[in-house]
Image (cartoon, rainbow, N blue to C red):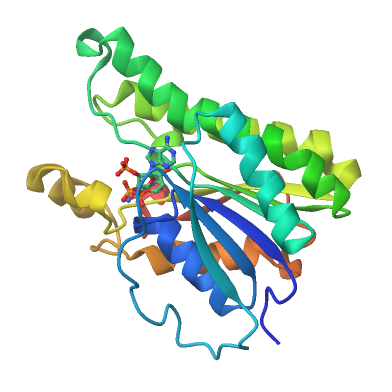
Amino acid sequence: MGRLTGKVALVTGGARGIGRGIAELFAAHGAAVTAVDVLDPAAPEGPADPAPRDGTGTLEHGRLDVTDERGWAETVAGVEERHGRLDILVNNAGVGSYEAVHELAPDEWQRVLGVNQTGVYLGMRAAIPALRRSGGGSIINISSIYGAAAVPGSLAYQATKGAVRSMTRNAAVTYAPDNIRANAVLPGWIRTPMTLAQTREFNDAVIASTPLGRGAEPLDIAHGCVYLASDESSYVTGTDLVIDGGFLAR
Ligand code: NAP
């Protein structure tokens, strides 16, 4: 029996990177997973986890731009139609942004807020009625170490990732009576298309500031998400799970 057997999950930004890792590991642990993205899924990345598969998990890919309110309604309705319920929402889709406030154009500010913050709002808004119909569930919002600590520049990114933590705590206290838990995950430097598109200097500086002296892989985040998605974390809500090699402990 997998740790997520019988659960139905929806993961945004699930075509690649951290979202892909979460979707594959959830399926490996027995969940019926729908991974949505603006992109087509990357080629299968192989077995996600050395843990034994229980054979009941499934992974299907679909399209959703998380800024699209109607798309959210259709996506959640589709999951309920195919699987009869929704138990887990992972708001993972996000975009990077690196400008300091004096050089940040209003359009870019709105673009980043649209995906990283409004996308999380729309996701929770669409999913909560379905989670209620399931008798409860788990919302996992992917924030960042930069939602807790400032580094120079990246104003919009840091603003949205801080907001995601606040929105998560708000959802936790608001929907606790519905048995809906909400937690944020704060990754440090993870090897994904997003970070590999950054300059080498930027990446080297983050890793040099990481006490463990290295970055990590999407699976390192996915393992934490399995815990938050499963009943093992049934008393955990409104918190941050920091998976950062010690970055925030400095
Ligand atoms: P990634 O490699 O860029 O993957 C994110 C996926 O989300 C991409 O396929 C991306 O498509 C998609 N996406 C972007 N905008 C979307 C939208 N409007 N609707 C649906 N999907 C959308 O990024 P990642 O590194 O895996 O990051 C995943 C999450 O972790 C993000 O929220 C990020 O902020 C957070 N995070 C990452 C790190 C890290 O070190 N990698 C650290 C802390 C937090 P496009 O390529 O077209 O944008």
Picture quarter with the N terminus: bottom right
Q: Nearer the viewer, residue 62 or 245?
A: 62
On the picture, is 108 further left or further right than 93? left
Q: Position of residue 244 (x, y in %)?
A: 39, 55
Q: Quadrant of ligand 1?
A: top left
Q: Nearer the viewer, residue 43 or 139?
A: 43
Residue drawn where x is 31% and y is 62% of the image:
42
Residue drawn where x is 41% and y is 82% of the image:
47
Q: Position of residue 160 (x, y in %)?
A: 45, 27
| In the rendered image, the vertical position of residue 69 relative to residue 5, given as above or below | above
Classify residue 109 by image quadrant. Answer: top left
| In the rendered image, the vertical position of residue 160 relative to residue 51, given as above or below | above
Residue 87 visible in the displayed image: no
Residue drawn where x is 42% and y is 65% of the image:
21
Classify residue 9 by image quadrant. Answer: bottom right
Q: Nearer the viewer, residue 123 or 199?
A: 123
Q: Position of residue 45 (x, y in %)?
A: 33, 73
Q: Position of residue 76 (x, y in %)?
A: 67, 45
- Total labels drawn: 0
Residue 101 visible in the displayed image: yes
On the picture, is 129 further left or further right than 71? right
Residue drawn where x is 35% and y is 72% of the image:
44
Q: Nearer the viewer, residue 31 or 75?
A: 75
| In the rendered image, the vertical position of residue 5 relative to residue 76, given as above or below | below
On the picture, is 76 further left or further right than 19? right
On the picture, is 17 further left or further right than 56? left
